[in-house]
Image (cartoon, grey):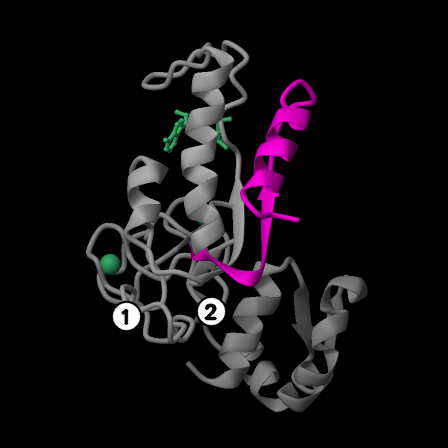
Amino acid sequence: MTRALALLADLRSRGVELETDGARLRWRPAFLAAPLVQLILAERAGLVELLTGPDRLERCPACRLPLDSARRCPKCFDRLCVDCGRPTGSYFVMRCVPCGHCLQEAVEPSPAAGASPDGDAVLCGDSRAVLVGLPDGLADLCVTDPPFNVGLEYDAHDDALPLADYLDLLHAVFRQVHRVLKPAGSLYVAICHEREPDVAILLRELGFH
Ligand SMILES: C[S@@+](CC[C@H](N)C(=O)[O-])C[C@H]1O[C@@H](n2cnc3c(N)ncnc32)[C@H](O)[C@@H]1O
Ligand SMILES: [Zn+2]
Ligand SMILES: [Zn+2]
Protein backbone atom coordinates (compact mmCIF):
# COMPACT_ATOMS: atom_id res chain seq x y z
CA MET A 1 0.00 0.00 0.00
CA THR A 2 1.46 3.39 -0.99
CA ARG A 3 1.61 6.22 1.55
CA ALA A 4 -0.98 8.17 -0.38
CA LEU A 5 -3.38 5.21 -0.43
CA ALA A 6 -2.86 4.59 3.30
CA LEU A 7 -3.54 8.26 4.01
CA LEU A 8 -6.65 8.29 1.83
CA ALA A 9 -7.94 5.18 3.63
CA ASP A 10 -7.33 6.78 7.04
CA LEU A 11 -9.03 10.03 6.00
CA ARG A 12 -12.05 8.28 4.51
CA SER A 13 -12.47 5.99 7.50
CA ARG A 14 -12.50 9.11 9.74
CA GLY A 15 -15.27 10.59 7.63
CA VAL A 16 -13.14 13.11 5.71
CA GLU A 17 -14.25 13.66 2.10
CA LEU A 18 -11.68 14.73 -0.50
CA GLU A 19 -12.36 16.27 -3.91
CA THR A 20 -10.12 17.27 -6.79
CA ASP A 21 -10.50 18.96 -10.15
CA GLY A 22 -7.36 17.18 -11.30
CA ALA A 23 -5.01 19.78 -9.86
CA ARG A 24 -6.40 21.33 -6.69
CA LEU A 25 -7.38 19.30 -3.64
CA ARG A 26 -10.17 20.11 -1.19
CA TRP A 27 -11.21 18.29 1.95
CA ARG A 28 -13.95 18.62 4.54
CA PRO A 29 -14.81 18.80 7.35
CA ALA A 30 -11.64 20.70 8.16
CA PHE A 31 -11.65 19.88 11.87
CA LEU A 32 -11.56 16.12 11.21
CA ALA A 33 -8.65 16.44 8.78
CA ALA A 34 -6.75 18.99 10.90
CA PRO A 35 -4.26 16.54 12.49
CA LEU A 36 -3.33 15.20 9.05
CA VAL A 37 -3.08 18.42 7.01
CA GLN A 38 0.73 18.33 6.80
CA LEU A 39 0.57 14.76 5.50
CA ILE A 40 -2.18 15.66 3.00
CA LEU A 41 -0.02 18.46 1.61
CA ALA A 42 3.02 16.17 1.42
CA GLU A 43 1.04 13.49 -0.45
CA ARG A 44 -1.00 15.90 -2.59
CA ALA A 45 0.12 14.50 -5.99
CA GLY A 46 -0.53 10.88 -4.98
CA LEU A 47 -3.94 11.75 -3.54
CA VAL A 48 -4.99 13.61 -6.71
CA GLU A 49 -3.95 10.60 -8.79
CA LEU A 50 -5.93 8.22 -6.56
CA LEU A 51 -9.03 10.43 -6.58
CA THR A 52 -9.05 10.66 -10.38
CA GLY A 53 -8.50 6.91 -10.88
CA PRO A 54 -10.62 3.85 -10.05
CA ASP A 55 -11.76 3.47 -6.42
CA ARG A 56 -9.04 1.41 -4.70
CA LEU A 57 -10.31 1.74 -1.13
CA GLU A 58 -11.06 -1.46 0.72
CA ARG A 59 -14.48 -1.60 2.38
CA CYS A 60 -15.80 -3.40 5.44
CA PRO A 61 -17.53 -6.61 4.31
CA ALA A 62 -20.21 -6.09 6.97
CA CYS A 63 -21.14 -2.40 6.70
CA ARG A 64 -19.32 -1.27 3.50
CA LEU A 65 -17.65 1.72 5.20
CA PRO A 66 -14.06 2.37 4.03
CA LEU A 67 -11.45 0.54 6.10
CA ASP A 68 -8.47 2.47 7.42
CA SER A 69 -4.88 1.65 6.47
CA ALA A 70 -4.75 -1.06 9.16
CA ARG A 71 -7.89 -2.68 7.62
CA ARG A 72 -10.03 -1.58 10.60
CA CYS A 73 -13.69 -0.61 10.46
CA PRO A 74 -14.49 2.16 12.95
CA LYS A 75 -18.19 1.27 12.92
CA CYS A 76 -17.94 -2.51 13.46
CA PHE A 77 -14.84 -1.98 15.61
CA ASP A 78 -13.17 -4.91 13.88
CA ARG A 79 -10.02 -5.51 11.85
CA LEU A 80 -9.63 -7.77 8.81
CA CYS A 81 -6.84 -10.34 9.12
CA VAL A 82 -3.92 -9.78 6.73
CA ASP A 83 -3.61 -13.56 6.46
CA CYS A 84 -7.09 -15.09 6.16
CA GLY A 85 -8.98 -11.87 5.28
CA ARG A 86 -11.74 -12.53 7.82
CA PRO A 87 -12.80 -10.14 10.60
CA THR A 88 -10.45 -10.85 13.51
CA GLY A 89 -13.00 -10.04 16.21
CA SER A 90 -10.99 -7.13 17.57
CA TYR A 91 -9.89 -3.61 16.71
CA PHE A 92 -6.88 -3.62 19.03
CA VAL A 93 -5.73 -7.19 19.72
CA MET A 94 -3.22 -8.09 17.04
CA ARG A 95 -3.97 -11.81 16.96
CA CYS A 96 -6.67 -13.04 14.56
CA VAL A 97 -9.09 -15.13 16.61
CA PRO A 98 -10.40 -17.20 13.60
CA CYS A 99 -6.99 -18.27 12.19
CA GLY A 100 -4.44 -17.44 14.90
CA HIS A 101 -2.29 -15.18 12.70
CA CYS A 102 -0.48 -12.47 14.64
CA LEU A 103 0.51 -9.15 13.11
CA GLN A 104 4.26 -8.61 13.27
CA GLU A 105 3.87 -4.92 14.00
CA ALA A 106 2.40 -5.84 17.37
CA VAL A 107 3.90 -3.97 20.30
CA GLU A 108 7.39 -5.19 21.17
CA PRO A 109 7.09 -7.65 24.02
CA SER A 110 8.29 -6.37 27.35
CA PRO A 111 11.54 -8.11 28.40
CA ALA A 112 9.59 -9.37 31.41
CA ALA A 113 6.85 -10.84 29.23
CA GLY A 114 8.59 -14.13 28.57
CA ALA A 115 5.29 -15.95 28.32
CA SER A 116 4.07 -13.70 25.50
CA PRO A 117 6.51 -13.79 22.56
CA ASP A 118 4.01 -12.07 20.26
CA GLY A 119 3.56 -9.14 22.62
CA ASP A 120 -0.21 -9.52 22.95
CA ALA A 121 -2.44 -12.24 24.25
CA VAL A 122 -6.01 -12.67 25.41
CA LEU A 123 -6.01 -15.08 28.35
CA CYS A 124 -9.47 -16.27 29.36
CA GLY A 125 -10.40 -17.95 32.60
CA ASP A 126 -10.83 -17.49 36.31
CA SER A 127 -8.64 -14.48 37.06
CA ARG A 128 -7.25 -16.17 40.17
CA ALA A 129 -5.88 -19.02 38.04
CA VAL A 130 -4.80 -16.89 35.06
CA LEU A 131 -2.89 -14.32 37.13
CA VAL A 132 -0.93 -17.00 38.99
CA GLY A 133 0.71 -17.96 35.67
CA LEU A 134 2.02 -14.45 34.97
CA PRO A 135 5.47 -13.24 36.08
CA ASP A 136 6.10 -10.58 38.72
CA GLY A 137 6.23 -6.96 37.60
CA LEU A 138 4.87 -7.64 34.10
CA ALA A 139 2.14 -5.04 33.78
CA ASP A 140 1.91 -1.25 33.73
CA LEU A 141 -1.84 -1.17 34.14
CA CYS A 142 -4.70 -3.29 35.43
CA VAL A 143 -8.26 -2.22 34.64
CA THR A 144 -10.92 -4.34 36.29
CA ASP A 145 -14.66 -4.48 36.80
CA PRO A 146 -15.07 -7.10 39.53
CA PRO A 147 -18.43 -8.36 40.81
CA PHE A 148 -20.08 -5.91 43.25
CA ASN A 149 -21.84 -8.61 45.28
CA VAL A 150 -25.17 -6.84 45.04
CA GLY A 151 -27.27 -9.80 43.94
CA LEU A 152 -27.01 -9.41 40.16
CA GLU A 153 -27.74 -12.50 38.09
CA TYR A 154 -24.72 -14.04 36.39
CA ASP A 155 -24.47 -17.37 34.58
CA ALA A 156 -21.55 -18.74 36.56
CA HIS A 157 -21.01 -16.40 39.47
CA ASP A 158 -22.95 -16.06 42.74
CA ASP A 159 -23.31 -12.30 43.29
CA ALA A 160 -24.88 -12.67 46.75
CA LEU A 161 -21.99 -14.18 48.70
CA PRO A 162 -21.53 -13.66 52.43
CA LEU A 163 -19.44 -10.48 52.72
CA ALA A 164 -16.39 -12.36 54.06
CA ASP A 165 -16.44 -14.80 51.10
CA TYR A 166 -16.80 -11.92 48.67
CA LEU A 167 -13.83 -10.10 50.17
CA ASP A 168 -11.83 -13.36 50.14
CA LEU A 169 -12.47 -13.60 46.40
CA LEU A 170 -11.33 -10.03 45.79
CA HIS A 171 -8.34 -10.54 48.07
CA ALA A 172 -7.19 -13.59 46.08
CA VAL A 173 -7.42 -11.67 42.80
CA PHE A 174 -5.90 -8.37 43.96
CA ARG A 175 -3.03 -10.12 45.75
CA GLN A 176 -1.99 -11.49 42.36
CA VAL A 177 -2.67 -8.16 40.63
CA HIS A 178 -0.31 -6.46 43.08
CA ARG A 179 2.42 -9.00 42.31
CA VAL A 180 1.96 -8.84 38.53
CA LEU A 181 1.89 -5.02 38.38
CA LYS A 182 5.15 -3.08 38.14
CA PRO A 183 6.00 -1.14 41.33
CA ALA A 184 4.91 2.08 39.60
CA GLY A 185 1.97 0.41 37.86
CA SER A 186 -1.63 1.59 38.16
CA LEU A 187 -4.84 -0.16 39.11
CA TYR A 188 -8.27 1.09 38.03
CA VAL A 189 -11.18 -0.62 39.78
CA ALA A 190 -14.83 -0.09 38.85
CA ILE A 191 -16.83 -0.56 42.03
CA CYS A 192 -20.14 0.62 43.45
CA HIS A 193 -20.48 3.06 46.38
CA GLU A 194 -21.68 0.34 48.78
CA ARG A 195 -18.46 -1.65 48.34
CA GLU A 196 -15.99 1.19 47.96
CA PRO A 197 -14.90 1.45 51.66
CA ASP A 198 -14.30 -2.31 52.07
CA VAL A 199 -12.46 -2.56 48.78
CA ALA A 200 -10.32 0.52 49.55
CA ILE A 201 -9.25 -1.02 52.90
CA LEU A 202 -8.53 -4.39 51.27
CA LEU A 203 -6.37 -2.75 48.60
CA ARG A 204 -4.41 -0.73 51.18
CA GLU A 205 -3.76 -3.89 53.18
CA LEU A 206 -2.34 -5.49 50.04
CA GLY A 207 0.11 -2.62 49.59
CA PHE A 208 -1.68 -0.45 47.03
CA HIS A 209 -1.46 3.25 47.76
C1 LIG B 1 -19.34 -6.40 37.16
S1 LIG B 1 -19.23 -7.80 36.10
C2 LIG B 1 -18.18 -7.26 34.82
C3 LIG B 1 -18.94 -6.96 33.59
C4 LIG B 1 -18.05 -6.61 32.42
N1 LIG B 1 -17.22 -5.46 32.70
C5 LIG B 1 -18.92 -6.34 31.21
O1 LIG B 1 -19.06 -5.17 30.80
O2 LIG B 1 -19.50 -7.30 30.69
C6 LIG B 1 -18.21 -8.92 37.00
C7 LIG B 1 -17.87 -10.18 36.21
O3 LIG B 1 -16.80 -10.88 36.89
C8 LIG B 1 -17.00 -12.27 36.68
N2 LIG B 1 -16.20 -13.02 37.67
C9 LIG B 1 -16.51 -13.33 38.93
N3 LIG B 1 -15.48 -13.99 39.51
C10 LIG B 1 -14.50 -14.07 38.58
C11 LIG B 1 -13.20 -14.65 38.57
N4 LIG B 1 -12.69 -15.27 39.65
N5 LIG B 1 -12.47 -14.56 37.42
C12 LIG B 1 -12.95 -13.94 36.34
N6 LIG B 1 -14.19 -13.37 36.29
C13 LIG B 1 -14.94 -13.45 37.40
C14 LIG B 1 -18.50 -12.43 36.85
O4 LIG B 1 -18.95 -13.63 36.24
C15 LIG B 1 -19.02 -11.18 36.12
O5 LIG B 1 -19.25 -11.47 34.77
ZN1 LIG C 1 -17.99 -2.29 9.32
ZN1 LIG D 1 -6.85 -14.65 10.16
199 in magenta = yes
* Residue found 65% across the figure and 87% down from its top: 44
Compared to residue 129, the image places residue 61 above or below, namely: below
| Residue 61 place in picture, x, y as percent | 37, 50
Please indicate whether residue 129 sits to the left or right of residue 168 in the image: left
Please tell me whether mark 1 sits on a helix, a strand or a loop: loop
Which image quadrant for residue 32?
bottom right
Which image quadrant for residue 198?
top right
User: The magenta stretch spans which residues?
Assistant: 180-209
Compared to residue 106, the image places residue 177 above or below, namely: above
| Label disc, if present, on residue 169 of the rendered structure | none
Residue behind label 2 places its C-beta within 8 angstroms of ligand 2:
no
Please indicate whether residue 56 sits to the left or right of residue 89 in the image: right
Question: Could you say which is closer to the camera, residue 129 or residue 1?
Answer: 129
* Residue found 63% across the figure and 33% down from its top: 201
* Residue found 28% across the figure and 70% down from its top: 117
- The residue that label 1 is drawn on is 117
- Residue at the extreme right of the image, as rendered: 31
| Residue 53 place in picture, x, y as percent | 49, 78
Sequence-earlier tag: 2 or 1: 2
Image quadrant, ligand 3: bottom left
| Mark 2 → mark 1, Cα distance in angstroms | 38 Å
Residue behind label 1 places its C-beta within 8 angstroms of ligand 3:
no
| Label disc, if present, on residue 55 of the rendered structure | 2
For badge 2, the amino acid type reads Asp
